[in-house]
């Protein structure tokens, strides 16, 4: 609780602020929180969706989160002119032979801006916006004007495919789909007589933003997180999806802001749930990345259920093979032995009466050294499997703690990640039981009276490191 002696932490304040901004909006928690996170990182958000899905309301509420930020909003059409965004030409400057704009009240002096139908603008406007969005600079006449821009929220129904639009599209770090309210939320939507505004809350001031920026500089990137980012980069390249170097750098900063605002000094694996909205261009590819992350986080590729299953199957097959193996049956005199077993009789090929033949096959027997080596191989794998099961349990506990404390985490992603970890844990329990059955099979192999001391080759399987 906030008191004079116990002020609210930045995490607590952001939690309160986010809850207030979400008030009255149905199924827009993820969008409002990610827009706020992007703004704290100094990045821009593109909302992609049909009209009437509260895109403009989301932007207006984001503006309320910053105490000293001016707000600018404009709907663009193919007939829009630069004056609508950047201000009219200054008559006084023209009289003095200078080509300058009066930017007061326009985008170059805004802190938070909402540009609706942003890709309907002509290439001249989009090109001017590129520098402003990326460098916070506006070319005004012969000089460059510094802009206090915190974040731009763009909105569009679709992203056109041309060179200028692609470059502009890359300036938006987050691309968030906004869809109509689902069937579950439709009843609550109908109960809204009018869209209620957020309750009173304290916006972020300049000192708090500076404090967040300072905290971000102390956040580190864990090696396992860097490895996952590299793995995703390779995956996107294989899929033909280009992610610029600049975007990867911005993604890492966004992850660090997420950690810093939750009072953590390192980016953790679970922060990577943010990647679909940064590293994929559209809803279909974002879903593919989200599916990959939900199945991959906390699951080491080398110890994935398919790979472990193949290893267990190799031991099971080897146990069956050694049980069914036969040797030539020699007597103590060194000769092949006859048998009286009718199952060993061989019928004459020309239809003559059955004749007793030499039954020279018998079940193979194994020395203690061989059997001990097989048991050792399985015991080693069981121990490593138990270690991985404990690692998996630790990840599940870590995810539960992250879910409890995270400001930004999407609950549906957490549900999917936990369900995957639980499913993997169940598979590992089954595989462990199968390994122990295979062990019992090796232990039950028929034994030689004396041990020749031969150590068997290891069962062929993929490395689990």
Image (cartoon, rainbow, N blue to C red):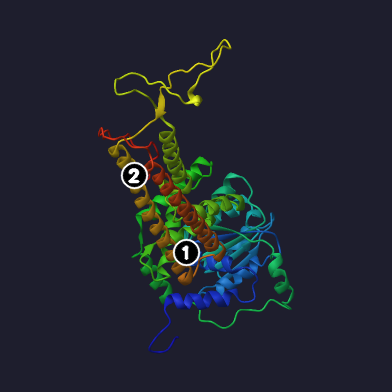
Taking 198 as reference, is 398 above or below it? above
Instruction: Give me the C-alpha separation between circle 2 and circle 1.
Output: 59 Å
Residue at 35%, 54% in the rendered image: 223
Q: How many marks?
A: 2
Taking 271 as reference, is 384 above or below it? above
Q: In the rendered image, which quarter is residue 214 located in?
A: bottom left
Give the x, y percent position of residue 220.
35, 61
**Residue 128 shows in this picture:** yes
Taking 42 as reference, is 236 above or below it? above
Is residue 53 toward the left or the right of residue 389 in the image?
right
**Residue 142 shows in this picture:** no
Which of these two is toward me, 250 or 241? 241
Checking the image for residue 106, the label placed there is none
Checking the image for residue 42, the label placed there is 1
Q: In the rendered image, which quarter is residue 57 located in?
A: bottom right
Is residue 402 toward the left or the right of residue 106 in the image?
left
Which of these two is toward me, 384 or 142? 384
Give the x, y percent position of residue 230.
42, 48
Q: Give the residue number, with chain letter if any, for mark 2.
A: 375
Q: Residue furthest top?
A: 350
């Amino acid at each position: 609780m906030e008191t004079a002696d116990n002020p609210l932490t930045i995490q607590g304040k952001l939690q309160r602020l986010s809850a207030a901004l979400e008030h009255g909006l149905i199924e827009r928690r993820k969008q409002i929180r990610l827009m706020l996170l992007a703004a704290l990182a100094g990045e821009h958000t593109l909302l992609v969706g049909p009209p009437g899905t509260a895109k403009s309301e989301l932007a207006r509420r984001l503006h309320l989160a910053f105490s000293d930020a001016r707000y600018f909003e404009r709907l663009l059409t193919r007939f829009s002119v630069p004056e609508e965004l950047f201000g009219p030409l200054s008559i006084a400057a023209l009289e003095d032979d200078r080509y300058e704009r009066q930017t007061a009240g326009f985008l170059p002096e805004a802190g938070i801006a909402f540009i609706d139908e942003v890709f309907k603008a002509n290439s001249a406007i989009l090109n001017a916006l590129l520098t402003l969005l990326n460098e916070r600079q506006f070319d005004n006449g012969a000089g460059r004007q510094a802009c206090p821009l915190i974040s731009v929220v763009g909105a569009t129904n679709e992203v056109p495919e041309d060179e200028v639009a692609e470059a502009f599209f890359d300036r938006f770090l987050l691309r968030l789909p906004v869809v109509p309210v689902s069937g579950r939320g439709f009843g609550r939507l109908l109960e809204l007589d009018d869209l209620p505004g957020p309750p009173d809350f304290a916006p972020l001031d300049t000192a708090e933003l500076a404090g967040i920026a300072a905290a971000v500089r102390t956040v580190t990137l864990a090696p396992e997180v860097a490895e996952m980012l590299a793995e995703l980069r390779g995956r996107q390249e294989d899929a033909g999806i280009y992610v610029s170097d600049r975007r990867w750098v911005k993604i890492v900063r966004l992850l660090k802001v997420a950690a810093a605002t939750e009072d953590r000094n390192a980016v953790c694996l679970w922060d990577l749930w943010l990647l679909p909205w940064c590293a994929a261009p559209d809803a279909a590819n974002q879903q593919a990345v989200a599916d990959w992350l939900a199945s991959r986080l906390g699951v080491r590729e080398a110890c994935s259920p398919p790979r472990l299953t193949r290893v267990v199957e190799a031991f099971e097959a080897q146990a069956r093979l050694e049980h069914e193996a036969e040797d030539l049956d020699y007597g103590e005199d060194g000769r092949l032995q006859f048998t009286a077993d009718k199952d060993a009789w061989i019928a004459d090929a020309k239809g003559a009466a059955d004749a007793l033949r030499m039954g020279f096959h018998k079940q193979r027997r194994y020395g203690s050294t061989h059997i001990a080596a097989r048991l050792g191989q399985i015991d080693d794998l069981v121990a490593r499997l138990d270690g991985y099961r404990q690692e998996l349990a630790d990840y599940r506990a870590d995810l539960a703690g992250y879910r409890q404390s995270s400001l930004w985490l999407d609950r549906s992603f957490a549900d999917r990640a936990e369900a995957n970890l639980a499913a993997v844990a169940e598979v590992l329990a089954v595989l462990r039981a199968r390994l122990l059955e295979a062990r019992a099979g090796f232990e039950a192999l028929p034994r030689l009276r004396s041990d020749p001391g031969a150590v068997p080759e290891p069962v062929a399987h993929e490395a689990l490191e």
